[in-house]
């Protein structure tokens, strides 16, 4: 086949494949078998490989990039990808509409479902898809062009396109694709994503676009960010225009004028949310006219011409099949409700903690009850109440002995919990090892619960200290391990020896001592010897500590098994000294920050170090005592809570500006 013939055949194959892609991905009506499709794709790849000069940017073969990327380039957004102000009641919706009416002349509003996905920008030059990026913090995102090309609902070329257009859309994973992915991950021994939103985010940011392609993502476009060569005056008009160009767009209402009409539309969408093939977490209400939007303007965070109504937490009835008992790393015996699966906030839920006996008594819970279960966003599911007892219902009582080792359980009045007091209880040993190897503790890559259980069941480890005696040849005898994976695990364990002392202290799993408390402890007593010899009175003087935390530390290091464990860990070369971080100045003194979401350029640990460098504190949860929340991409419930409490929200850019400027 000569070049002229190849060019003709490439054109024919491309047109056929584009047509088949449209029928398969957009219409959901496949017109050829997978085998026939794959044969056509292979032929096209072969021809383009033989004649690379004939390869076009919109070729179907360019949907999947074959090269892995070690990092994503940063993209500065020319138009800020702003977030929306959340509202949680119809009164707030009415107040928003009234405010718009006071400032504008007869405004009209558009109502749209709010897709629970990942916001991205798509740029087209002369009708050809040139660049795609994540939202990031709204000002700076990441270039994920090759990964976005794997999404078949993103057109690579536009019909009758303007010279330039940038649009914003929401990448999501359909509920069907999410269920298939979860099944595949479970079969492969992987931990499934929590929900479709997390799955979409994790899939889009894969270093290898071929992995993204297998995840079957979709997109709905909902906004024009920039455009050249075309005048658009209203949102409804712009959505209709985007459809003409070939985009799959979000559904929207007709223009509405009254609050009651808007609320009726919100209710309709809410009642039908289970019909959508994707998760929605709310409804967006926005002014239609672009001129009126400009008239209203924006704050530094959000536009004044739109709000996002967030659905209240979902509650559903289900049948309580059983109550199982879990024993944690500190010996706490926790009852767990096991019920008929229900779908809540985008995930299938079948388990929820019942906390302790007091909680069970208060809710009047018995096995066999019909119960109400609630879940909001990524919040852990909870049992709200019992609504119906069976005829022979019996009040549930926690066991008097540990269900794992048989040791008599003791009530911990401080925590209102039962506790197994046997430090060698197999359940506690395993949970302590899982905690020790976790990301925020010793961060031993490749040592998750399954692999730890394999090592434990094989008799290779009985405590965390045994990890540092493992040999590659021992690991190779186990299922799931090959030469490379065994070598990687040994290297990861060896690398953990260089972790700072505060990570080790946190990894030891001392009751009441989290990662921040471990860091404060090490700053006050910068060696393991000093910590072990410190009195409760001295430790209680640390800011943020108290008598309970101080006694927890003294009691822990006073136990013989802990002394023996620490001695072994020191023998194997783990940290015994703590390097005090230099404080540049105290501009953040007395200020508490919370980090949430993926920041554009920093890891969370880097942002944490930056805040602490200037005297600030970083907390893991939002409360009334929080001063700032630094929010990145995929910020979830923490951001919602911060907005509800009126806490100042910062982008990464604003945080760095606060540290670079002089006080």
Image (cartoon, rainbow, N blue to C red):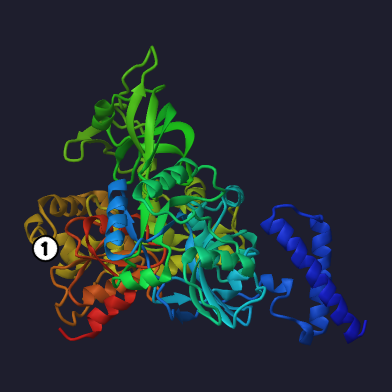
Q: Is residue 537 above or below residue 224?
A: above
Is residue 565 something that shows in the picture?
no
User: Which residue carries the number 1 mark?
Assistant: 543
Locate the C terminus by quadrant. bottom left
Residue 382 lies left or right of residue 339; in this view the side is left
Q: Pick out the residue farthest to the top.
A: 391
Residue situated in front as seen by the camera: 413 or 267: 267
Q: Is residue 111 above or below residue 269?
A: below
Q: In percent of the image, x 64 and y 67: which residue is there?
A: 210
Residue situated in front as seen by the camera: 513 or 102: 102
Residue 293's x, y, as percent?
37, 69
Q: Pick out the residue farthest to the front.
A: 105
Q: Quadrant of residue 585?
A: bottom left
Is residue 135 something that shows in the picture?
yes
Residue 418's x, y, as percent?
26, 34
Residue 580's x, y, as percent?
21, 76
Residue situated in front as seen by the camera: 336 or 530: 336
| Dot 1 alpha-carbon crowd within 10 angstroms: few under 14, some 14 to 19, many 20 or more | few
Locate the N terminus by quadrant. bottom right
Q: Is residue 371 above or below residue 380?
A: above
Q: State the count of labels.
A: 1
Residue situated in front as seen by the camera: 458 or 411: 411
Disc 1 element:
loop
Residue 579's x, y, as percent?
24, 76
Residue 474 lies left or right of residue 562; in this view the side is right
Q: In percent of the image, x 54 and y 64: which residue is there?
A: 239
Q: Pick out the residue farthest to the right.
A: 1
């Amino acid at each position: 086949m000569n070049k002229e013939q190849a060019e003709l055949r490439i054109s024919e194959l491309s047109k056929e494949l584009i047509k088949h892609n449209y029928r398969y991905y957009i219409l959901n009506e496949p017109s050829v078998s997978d085998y026939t499709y794959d044969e056509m794709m292979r032929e096209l790849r072969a021809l383009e490989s033989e004649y690379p000069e004939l390869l076009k940017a919109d070729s179907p073969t360019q949907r999947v990039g074959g090269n892995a990327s070690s990092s994503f380039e940063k993209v500065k957004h020319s138009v800020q990808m702003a977030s929306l102000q959340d509202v949680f009641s119809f009164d707030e919706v009415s107040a928003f509409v009234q405010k718009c009416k006071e400032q504008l002349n007869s405004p009209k509003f558009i109502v749209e479902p709010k897709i629970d996905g990942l916001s991205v920008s798509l740029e087209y030059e002369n009708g050809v898809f040139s660049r795609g990026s994540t939202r990031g913090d709204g000002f700076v995102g990441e270039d994920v062009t090759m990964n976005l090309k794997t999404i078949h609902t993103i057109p690579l070329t536009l019909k009758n396109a303007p010279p330039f257009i940038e649009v914003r859309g929401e990448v999501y994973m359909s509920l069907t694709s999410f269920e298939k992915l979860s099944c595949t991950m479970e079969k492969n021994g992987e931990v499934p994503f929590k929900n479709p939103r997390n799955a979409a985010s994790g899939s889009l940011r894969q270093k290898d676009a071929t992995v993204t392609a297998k995840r079957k993502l979709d997109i709905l476009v909902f906004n024009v960010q920039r455009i050249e060569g075309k005048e658009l005056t209203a949102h409804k008009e712009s959505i209709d225009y985007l459809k003409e160009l070939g985009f799959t767009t979000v559904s929207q209402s007709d223009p509405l004028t009254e609050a009651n009409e808007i609320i009726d539309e919100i209710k309709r969408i809410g009642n039908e949310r289970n019909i959508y093939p994707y998760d929605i977490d709310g409804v967006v209400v926005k002014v239609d006219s672009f001129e009126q939007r400009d008239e209203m303007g924006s704050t530094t965070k959000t536009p004044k011409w739109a709000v996002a109504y967030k659905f209240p937490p979902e509650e559903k009835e289900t049948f309580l099949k059983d109550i199982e008992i879990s024993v944690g790393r500190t010996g706490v015996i926790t009852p767990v409700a096991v019920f008929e699966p229900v779908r809540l906030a985008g995930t299938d839920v079948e388990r929820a903690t019942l906390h302790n006996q007091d909680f069970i008594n208060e809710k009047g819970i018995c096995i066999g009850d019909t119960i109400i279960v609630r879940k909001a966003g990524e919040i852990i599911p909870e049992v709200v109440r019992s609504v119906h007892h069976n005829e022979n219902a019996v009040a549930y009582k926690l066991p008097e002995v540990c269900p794992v080792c048989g040791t008599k359980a003791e009530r911990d009045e401080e925590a209102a919990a039962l506790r197994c007091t046997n430090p060698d209880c197999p359940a506690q040993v395993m949970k302590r090892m899982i905690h020790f190897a976790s990301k925020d503790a010793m961060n031993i890559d490749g040592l998750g619960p399954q692999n730890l259980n394999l090592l434990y069941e094989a008799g290779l480890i009985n405590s965390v200290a045994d990890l540092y005696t493992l040999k590659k040849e021992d690991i190779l005898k186990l299922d799931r391990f090959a030469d490379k994976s065994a070598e990687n695990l040994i290297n990861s364990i060896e690398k953990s020896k260089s972790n700072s002392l505060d990570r080790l202290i946190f990894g030891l799993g001392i009751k009441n001592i989290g990662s921040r408390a471990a860091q404060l402890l090490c700053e006050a007593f910068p060696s393991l010897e000093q910590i072990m010899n410190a009195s409760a009175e001295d430790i209680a003087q640390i800011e943020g500590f108290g008598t309970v935390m101080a006694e927890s530390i003294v009691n822990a290091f006073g136990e013989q098994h802990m002394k023996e464990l620490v001695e072994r860990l020191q023998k194997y070369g783990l940290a015994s000294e703590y390097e005090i971080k230099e404080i540049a100045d105290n501009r953040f003194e007395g200020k508490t920050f919370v980090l949430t979401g993926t920041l554009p350029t920093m890891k969370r640990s880097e942002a944490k170090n930056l805040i602490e460098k200037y005297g600030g504190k970083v907390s893991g949860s939002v409360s009334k005592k929080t001063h700032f929340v630094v929010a990145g991409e995929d910020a979830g419930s923490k951001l919602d809570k911060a907005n509800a409490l009126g806490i100042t929200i910062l982008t990464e850019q604003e945080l760095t500006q606060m540290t670079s400027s002089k006080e």
